[in-house]
Image (cartoon, rainbow, N blue to C red):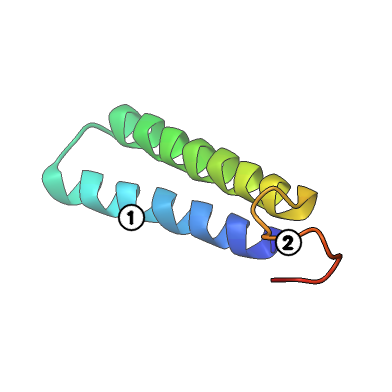
């Protein structure tokens, strides 16, 4: 799952770089926005993974079985 998070974060950063270069933004602006996109997707993905692993997003009916 961590590999998926890393792949999505790199994909988001790559998309920002591609769009930024296509639109003619400055190099520093593109790199800054790519870094923000990478960190944002990585942190959101890590938080989602933490919630899934802790069981907060996994439905249970109190019987010990998955619902």
Is 13 in front, or is 55? 55
Give the labeled residue for mark 1. 15
Q: Which residue is mark 2?
A: 61
Q: Which residue is pictured at 65% across the width and 45% down the height?
A: 46
* Position in image of residue 47 (x %, y %): 63, 41
> What is the number of callouts on the image?
2
| Relative side of 58 to 15, left or right | right
Residue 48 location (% of width, % of height): 61, 48
Front of the two marks 2 and 1: 2
Where residue 55 appears, as percent x and y from the top left, is: 75, 52
The one of 67 and 17 positioned closer to us in this rendering: 67
Label 2 and label 1: CA atoms lie apart by 41 Å
User: Badge 1 local density, few (<14 within 10 Å), some, or many (20+)?
Assistant: some
Secondary structure under the numbered disc 2 in the rendered image? loop
Q: Judge from the rendering whether residue 30 lies leftward or rightward of residue 25; answer left or right.
A: right
> Which image quarter: residue 24?
top left
From this view, report whether residue 8 is shown above or below residue 66.
above
At horizontal 13% and vertical 45% (from top left) the residue drawn is 23
């Amino acid at each position: 799952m961590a590999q998926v998070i890393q792949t999505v974060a790199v994909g988001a950063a790559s998309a920002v770089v591609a769009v930024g270069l296509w639109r003619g933004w400055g190099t520093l602006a593109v790199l800054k926005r790519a870094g923000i996109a990478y960190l944002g997707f990585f942190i959101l993905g890590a938080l989602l993974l933490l919630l899934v692993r802790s069981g907060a997003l996994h439905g249970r009916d109190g019987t010990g079985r998955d619902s």
